[in-house]
Structures are given as C-alpha cells and as structure tokens.
Image (cartoon, rainbow, N blue to C red):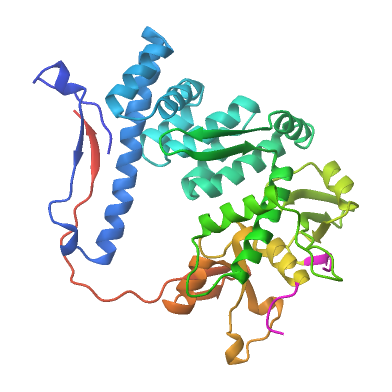
C-alpha cells in the first residue's frame, strides 16, 4: 500500500520508501501463501518503481534530463540505457493520469505503463480501455493488445505505422571486445520479421532432426547454427527435390453482414492493414486463412501421426501461440491432447500448439490440456501437493 504521511523525525525520513516484509520464512508458508507473497511482492515492486519514476519526472523538471539520468543511474545501479528509458517514460506519463494512478497503486507494472506511454506518443488512445486491459494481462500479451488498439484507433488501418516501421529497419554487426564474440543485431517491420522468423525456425528444426538425441544443443546454440548456415552456405537440396518452402500465414475475419474482410493480422496476432493482406494473399509462399466472427475456420490454404503442414497452419491460425505459456508459434509443435499411443487421432479437435518446455511438462510432469467453454485450449498444472498451513503476512510499500 502506498500512502503519504508527514513525519516528525525529519525531512529525510519523510521521503524514504519502506517495504514491510513477511515475518516468517518462505519454507513455513503454504502453497497458497507463497503465491500470495509473489503477488504482493510484485505489486510492491511496481509501487516502488512508480515512486522512483515520479521522482525522476520532477527531478528532470528541475535540473534537466542529463543530470536526472546520471542521478538515476548512480542511485539505482541500472545501465545507461535503462536509466534513459525510465526518464523518458516518466516524461511521457505526465499527461496520462489514469496510467499514473494504476502504476502508483501497483495495479500495473512499469512495462505496462511504458507501453501505454509509447502508444500514446504515436496515436490517440482510449486511456481507460488500455489501463483496464493492462490490469488483466501480462506485459507480453498486453503489448499485442496495445498494438491492436493503436491500429483500431488509426484512420488508415495501420498503414502509416507499417510504413514507419519499414523506414525504421536497421541491422548491424560488431565485435564484443570483452570476449571477442561477433554480435549481430537487427530490427524489422512485423511482416519482414515474421518471414525471417519462419525461415530460421524451419532451419533450426532441420538441424534438430539431424542431431544426436543423446547430445542435444541448447535452443540458442541451434538457432545460432541455423543463422550461420543460412548466411554462409547455399541451401541444401536433396537430389530430385526442391528446397523446403516456408510459408507466411496471414489471418483475417470475414464479416458476412457487409461481406468485408476485417481484423487482418500475422500468425502471432500482430495487426496488418487489410489492403496489405489482400495484396500479399496472392503472392508466393503466402497462406491466407479466413475465419468467421466466432473464430471458426472458413478456409485455410493447403500445404499418420504427425500433423500435416495444412493442419499446422490451421493450428497457428486458431491457437496463435503456445496454449501453455504463450510462446511464439514458430517455436511450437502440434501436440496430441489424447495421446497417439492411446488411439488419439491426428485431428484438429485433438491437436493444440505447445512449445518444447510445455510439451515436457505435459509428457513428464502430468500437466493437462483443457478446453474452456469458449473453445480455447489451456494448460493446467497437476493437483498441488498438500503442505503445512502457516500464518499469512502481506508485503507492502510505504512512504513515510
């Protein structure tokens, strides 16, 4: 809880941030109490960050950005980049009273506040709507929701945003002098980024199939090898066959009332202008999928035990991401809800997207896939192991 109180013990004390910690160690808490501690600690963290951001905004007003960034870096131990980012966000939040209140109350994180502030700097927003969404969604999920909101608020279906992103593309290569490693970096618009991600994913999966199962690489090592192979070697082709083709999946909804296509997006939910969807749908290696307003597939391009290429594309269009943790669909596999060994069919109704980590949880740790009343698939943990009950203490941030 955050509150202001005058102190008779001196001016310095009145401006200190205090955190009240649980009285008992974590090992004495029940599972429910441990979850409550994580919740209240997260809220306290956001409240403390809001106090710091508010102070940075006022300090910048008094002595300028450069001195404020330097002071923040020295007092927080953050990098130059993070300190600069925090001061910039503090400035942008000045005109967003709802965001500042939700942030100060610990209802949203700094990540949520920064996304809303950045979005407000590019487009007119409904602040109340975004704050309500931020209170209910993790930062990565909310970021996608904010992008959709920005497109819905635009007057050109997001075309100007896409053009700006294309203009802002950049890439570079440098040597990390601390260890001599070469570092590549790049920024692309969402459509180009999706193409690159699909190619890298396909190459990474190819390398995984060629690995010795007893000596697996890490996913990061495999991705680095895939990138090196794609950049430095010609594509491998088997005699008499074509090189693997990687499709870009575009998704849209069809409104039967006025017979128009709406809500065009990439497989991960990134919105794109409908005009771009129409133009790209006729291109090579593009698979357009059209759904009705209830997310039932009206049509999906075509491309045993393993899901077919067409089924995988339909799964990406339906689930959008790993149903367990929300990982990008490029890193997911088609999972049989009723196992193949138990006569589970390779049908859409028996398939969902899972990343490798969530796949492991289902197969080895007894997590289960359930279908909600809305038809969405979710992953649930096994029943908790009984534990001793103990006293509950909450955590709070106080300003004295």
Q: Nearer the viewer, residue 76 or 297?
A: 76
User: What residue is drawn where x is 36% and y is 40%?
Assistant: 106
Q: Is residue 24 left or right of residue 352?
A: left
Q: Is residue 58 left or right of residue 264?
A: left
User: What residue is drawn where x is 65% and y is 58%?
Assistant: 201
Seen as rendered, the residue at the extreme left is 9
Q: Give how far across and how far down residue 39 sits, in percent.
A: 33, 51
The majority secondary structure of the magenta stretch comes to: loop
Per the image, is 1 magenta? no
Q: Give how far across and how far down residue 254 sits, in percent.
A: 83, 56
User: Which quadrant is home to the N terminus?
Assistant: top left
Q: Give how far across and how far down residue 263 sits, in percent.
A: 76, 49
Magenta-drawn segment: 297-308
Q: Is residue 135 visible?
A: yes
**Residue 336 to residue 235: above or below:** below
User: Which quadrant is home to the C terminus?
Assistant: top left
Q: Is residue 147 left or right of residue 90?
A: right
Q: Nearer the viewer, residue 322 or 304?
A: 304
Q: Give how far across and how far down residue 301 sits, in percent.
A: 84, 65
Per the image, is 302 magenta? yes
Q: Is residue 6 visible?
A: no
**Residue 84 to residue 359: above or below:** above
């Amino acid at each position: 809880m955050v509150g202001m109180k005058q102190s008779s013990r001196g001016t310095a004390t009145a401006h200190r941030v205090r955190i009240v910690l649980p009285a008992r160690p974590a090992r004495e808490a029940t599972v429910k109490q441990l979850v409550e501690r994580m919740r209240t600690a997260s809220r306290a963290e956001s409240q403390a960050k809001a106090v710091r951001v508010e102070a940075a905004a006022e300090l910048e007003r008094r002595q300028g950005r450069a001195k404020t960034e330097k002071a923040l870096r020295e007092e927080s131990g953050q990098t130059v980049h993070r300190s600069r980012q925090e001061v910039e966000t503090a400035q942008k939040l000045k005109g967003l009273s709802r965001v500042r209140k939700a942030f100060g109350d610990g209802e949203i994180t700094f990540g949520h506040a920064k996304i809303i502030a950045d979005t407000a700097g590019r487009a007119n927003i409904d602040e109340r709507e975004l704050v309500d969404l931020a209170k209910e969604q993790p930062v990565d999920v909310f970021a996608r929701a904010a992008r959709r909101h920005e497109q819905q608020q635009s007057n050109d279906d997001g075309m100007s945003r896409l053009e700006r992103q294309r203009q802002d593309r950049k890439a570079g290569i440098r040597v990390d002098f601390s260890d001599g490693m070469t570092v590549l970096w790049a920024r692309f618009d969402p459509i180009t980024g999706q193409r690159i991600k699909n190619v890298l994913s396909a190459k990474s999966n190819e390398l995984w199939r060629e690995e010795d199962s007893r000596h697996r690489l890490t996913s990061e090592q495999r991705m680095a090898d895939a990138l090196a192979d794609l950049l430095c070697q010609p594509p491998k082709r088997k005699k008499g066959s074509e090189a693997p083709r990687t499709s870009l999946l575009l998704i849209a909804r069809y409104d039967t009332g006025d017979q128009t296509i709406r809500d065009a997006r990439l497989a991960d939910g990134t919105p794109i202008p409908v005009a771009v969807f129409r133009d790209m749908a006729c291109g090579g290696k593009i698979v357009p999928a059209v759904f009705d307003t209830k997310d039932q597939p009206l049509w999906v391009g075509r491309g045993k035990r393993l899901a077919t290429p067409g089924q995988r594309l339909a799964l990406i269009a339906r689930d959008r991401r790993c149903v367990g943790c929300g990982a990008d669909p490029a890193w997911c596999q088609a999972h049989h809800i009723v196992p193949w060994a138990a006569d589970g069919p390779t049908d859409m109704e028996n398939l969902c997207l899972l990343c490798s980590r969530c796949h492991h949880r289902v197969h080895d740790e007894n997590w289960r896939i359930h279908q909600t009343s809305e038809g969405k698939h979710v992953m649930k943990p096994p029943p908790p192991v009984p534990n001793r009950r103990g006293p509950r203490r909450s955590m709070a941030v106080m300003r004295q």
